[in-house]
């Protein structure tokens, strides 16, 4: 085997080892990434709960605003104040 052929095989072997290492690293990256992305169902459940609570809070706030508006209207109507009976004279006891 002449020196140029040996150098070619050495270069080819180095390339295969380097490419295999890189491909193994890429495979590990995607495999680990997929493994840790799986528990998104818990995050999705929390997001759904949060959306439900926000909707419930919005409806409760609307109800409270309606109640405050009602009370404000009642206060604005203003009934004349009820006169209290005159203060009784002090009786000796």
Image (cartoon, helix red, strand yellow):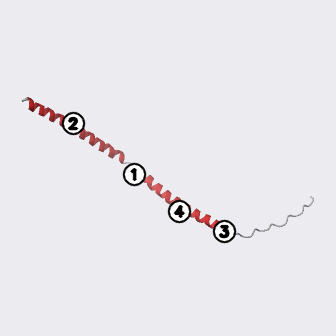
User: Residue at position x 59%, y 65% from top?
Assistant: 66
Q: Earlier in the sequence, mark 4 or mark 1?
A: 1
The residue pinned by badge 3 equals 74
The residue pinned by badge 2 equals 18
Taking the image as shown, residue 18 lies to the left or right of residue 31, namely left
Taking the image as shown, residue 91 lies to the left or right of residue 66, namely right
Return the mark for residue 64.
none
**Neighbourhood count class around disc 1 (C-alpha, 10 Å): few under 14, some 14–19, many 20 upward:** few
The residue pinned by badge 1 equals 41
Return the mark for residue 59.
4
Q: CA distance from mark 1 to mark 2?
A: 38 Å
Question: Mark 1 falls on what kind of element?
Answer: helix
- Mark 1 and mark 3 in contact? Answer it, CB < 8 Å: no
- Mark 4 and mark 3 in contact? Answer it, CB < 8 Å: no
Q: Percent x, y for residue 23?
A: 24, 41
Q: CA distance from mark 1 to mark 3?
A: 50 Å
Q: CA distance from mark 4 to mark 3?
A: 23 Å
- Mark 4 and mark 2 in contact? Answer it, CB < 8 Å: no
Taking the image as shown, residue 61 lies to the left or right of residue 38, namely right
Q: Percent x, y for residue 41?
A: 39, 51
Taking the image as shown, residue 65 lies to the left or right of residue 10, namely right
Q: Earlier in the sequence, mark 4 or mark 2?
A: 2
Question: Mark 2 falls on what kind of element?
Answer: helix
Closer to viewer: mark 1 or mark 2: 2
Q: Earlier in the sequence, mark 4 or mark 3?
A: 4
**Quadrant in which the C terminus is drawn:** bottom right
Q: Nearer the viewer, residue 43 or 76?
A: 76
């Amino acid at each position: 085997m002449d020196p140029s052929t040996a150098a070619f095989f050495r270069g080819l072997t180095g390339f295969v080892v380097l490419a295999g290492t890189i491909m193994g690293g890429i495979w590990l990256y995607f495999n680990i990434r997929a493994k840790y992305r799986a528990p998104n169902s818990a995050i999705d459940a929390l997001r759904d709960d949060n959306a439900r609570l926000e909707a419930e809070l919005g409806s409760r706030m609307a109800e409270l605003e309606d109640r405050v508006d009602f009370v404000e209207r009642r206060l604005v109507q203003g009934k004349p104040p009820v006169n209290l009976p005159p203060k009784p004279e002090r009786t000796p006891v």
